Image (cartoon, rainbow, N blue to C red):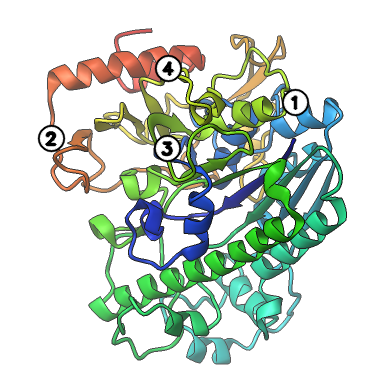
């Protein structure tokens, strides 16, 4: 068996026609027509690398640590496939793999191909950027003149994109087509093609703004505006429309590139012996609920409820069938191992989704937990979503447990390491102790949730209120969900302080 794992970043469920979206996405539709479509698939840990640790290990990351590498005790599906003798290859323009906080992921594969230039990848060297030209070229919200943030390097990187072939996603697909051409005759392999798109900045060739007939004119007349800030909405109606239109254009670009891969599947007759998994790590708020982006705000379904489709050559479900079972990101790892008949370790808590494709009952999930380290514990049972916040978001009864003390782009600083203690209380570390480190609010990790009036504990009824516009509280529902949450936390060996932080009585 061969598998192609297609991973897009920040691909909104609502952007796809198969989930009721208004964007024209013929190639996502084309794959969906052959696949099982999962209707209740949710994120786990957010954002980028925490989500990928969930995917690799079949366990939630956010209960124990923030953004960081795979740990020495982690069971990565890519490493397990490689050790079983199956060749695995990663093609990615997701530059976070090559920073401190992601440095152990790509080396789990047999080989990898890194495409440069997305977002603020430190790729294009420019000692003296043309700041005044950039100032005129980009919206003031998007312009930066220092290297402290992401945006100046992002503007520099875009100077190297002169033709469509220069876009990193196009290069990822070119590398994918070359791999398929060179290796389609081999009997077994695993290929992960992962692109940073449609993550911000929403940069796509201009023809995609003209191509989608459903896309109305935005009325925006200013400089380039395709990179929103992670904050509450402050933009004008025209600016909001411009940002949303640029996201839609980038999704259309993703769709066209997906079509090139499907065309190669057709020409090489790979459908007979190749499985495909297509999903994302999380979604992205595009002004819904008066928010942009992810991380800081409540994790509404625009962020947490994500697309997933799986094709298997021997699946018994008809292509285009919808599966209503509650699933989440941690289920991908055992599914991949199951496709290749590889054993999963006892530490894996995700459930294989393969039985659903063969019309068999899967292991039903009663609850899905999702969140960011230091933020709310969010959960859904498929009927309700529950955002549960601690009384004090910035309380210091919060610790990181790790043997790999790295943040997104930096090592832990010495003041973070100085109070470290060894902790031996987790079985999933396989008898290895880990460092227990206070989670200082000043640390250079992904921003925690909090500091806003609408980050309050609440429920939403997804049947009567699917757009989550009417929060409410109900003691009986919350008590039932808290019991399920605690059961899942116990399975993941959540540290004691989390029960105290959220005032959960069960452990």
Relative placement, left or right, of 391 versus 425 is: left
| Mark-to-mark CA distance, 4 and 1 | 24 Å
Q: Quick one: SS at disc 4?
A: helix
Label 4 vs 1, first from the N-terminus: 1
Q: Mark 2 = which residue?
A: 472
Q: Mark 3 = which residue?
A: 41
Label 3 vs 1, first from the N-terminus: 3
Q: Residues within 10 Å of mark 2 (few under 14, many from 20)?
A: few
Q: Are marks 3 and 4 in contact (CB under 8 Å)?
A: no
Residue 492 vs residue 66, the one in the foreground = 492
| Mark-to-mark CA distance, 3 and 4 | 17 Å
Residue 2 vs residue 226, the one in the foreground = 2
Q: Mark 1 = which residue?
A: 72
| Mark-to-mark CA distance, 2 and 3 | 23 Å
Residue at image location 45% in from the left, 19% down from the top: 361
Relative placement, left or right, of 85 versus 163 is: right
Label 2 vs 1, first from the N-terminus: 1
Q: Does residue 362 show up?
A: yes
Q: Quick one: SS at disc 3?
A: strand
Q: Is residue 483 above or below residue 320?
A: above
Q: Are marks 2 and 1 in contact (CB under 8 Å)?
A: no
Q: Quick one: SS at disc 1?
A: loop
Q: Mark 4 = which residue?
A: 488
For residue 500, which numbered disc appears in the image? Answer: none
> Which mark lies nearer to you, 2 or 1?
2
Residue at image location 66% in from the left, 60% down from the top: 261
Residue at image location 12% in from the left, 25% down from the top: 474
Q: Quick one: SS at disc 2?
A: loop
């Amino acid at each position: 068996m061969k598998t192609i794992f297609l991973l897009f970043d920040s691909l909104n469920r609502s952007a796809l026609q198969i989930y009721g979206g208004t964007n024209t996405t013929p190639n996502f539709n084309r794959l969906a027509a052959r696949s099982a479509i999962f209707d209740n698939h949710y994120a786990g840990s957010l954002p980028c690398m925490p989500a990928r640790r969930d995917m690799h290990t079949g366990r939630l990351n956010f209960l124990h640590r923030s953004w960081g590498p795979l740990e020495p005790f982690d069971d990565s599906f890519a490493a397990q496939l490689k050790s079983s003798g199956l060749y695995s290859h990663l093609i990615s323009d997701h530059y976070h793999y090559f920073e401190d906080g992601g440095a152990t992921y790509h080396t789990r594969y047999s080989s990898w191909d890194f495409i440069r230039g997305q977002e603020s990848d430190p790729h294009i060297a420019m000692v003296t950027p043309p700041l005044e030209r950039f100032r005129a070229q980009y919206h003031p919200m998007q312009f930066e003149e220092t290297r402290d943030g992401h945006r100046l390097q992002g503007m520099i990187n875009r100077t190297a994109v002169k033709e469509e072939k220069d876009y990193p996603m196009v290069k990822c697909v070119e590398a994918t087509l070359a791999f398929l051409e060179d290796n389609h005759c081999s009997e077994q392999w695993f290929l992960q093609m992962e692109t940073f798109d449609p993550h911000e900045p929403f940069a796509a060739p201009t023809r995609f703004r003209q191509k989608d007939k459903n896309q109305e004119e935005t009325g925006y007349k200013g400089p380039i505006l395709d990179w929103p800030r992670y904050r509450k909405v402050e933009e004008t109606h025209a600016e909001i429309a411009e940002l949303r239109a640029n996201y839609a254009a980038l999704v259309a670009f993703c769709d066209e590139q997906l079509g090139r891969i499907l065309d190669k599947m057709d020409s090489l007759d790979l459908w007979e012996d190749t499985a495909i998994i297509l999903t994302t790590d999380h979604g992205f708020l595009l002004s819904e609920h008066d928010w942009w982006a992810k991380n800081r705000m409540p994790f509404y379904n625009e962020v947490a409820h994500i697309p997933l489709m799986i094709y298997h050559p021997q699946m018994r479900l008809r292509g285009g069938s919808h599966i209503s079972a509650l699933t989440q990101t941690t289920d991908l790892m055992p599914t991949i191992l199951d496709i290749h008949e590889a054993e999963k370790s006892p530490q894996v808590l995700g459930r294989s989704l393969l039985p659903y494709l063969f019309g068999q009952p899967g292991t039903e999930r009663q609850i899905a937990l999702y969140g960011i380290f230091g933020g709310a514990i969010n959960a859904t049972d498929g009927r309700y979503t529950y955002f549960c916040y601690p009384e004090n978001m910035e309380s210091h009864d919060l610790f990181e447990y790790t043997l790999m003390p790295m943040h997104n782009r930096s090592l832990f600083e010495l003041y973070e390491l100085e109070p470290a203690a060894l902790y031996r209380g987790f079985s999933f570390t396989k008898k290895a102790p880990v460092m227990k480190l206070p989670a200082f609010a000043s640390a250079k990790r992904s921003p925690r949730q909090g500091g806003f009036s609408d980050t309050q504990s609440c429920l939403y009824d997804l049947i009567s209120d699917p757009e989550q516009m009417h929060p409410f509280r109900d003691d009986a529902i919350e008590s039932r969900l808290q019991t399920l949450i605690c059961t899942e936390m116990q399975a993941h060996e959540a540290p004691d302080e989390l029960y105290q932080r959220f005032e959960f009585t069960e452990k």
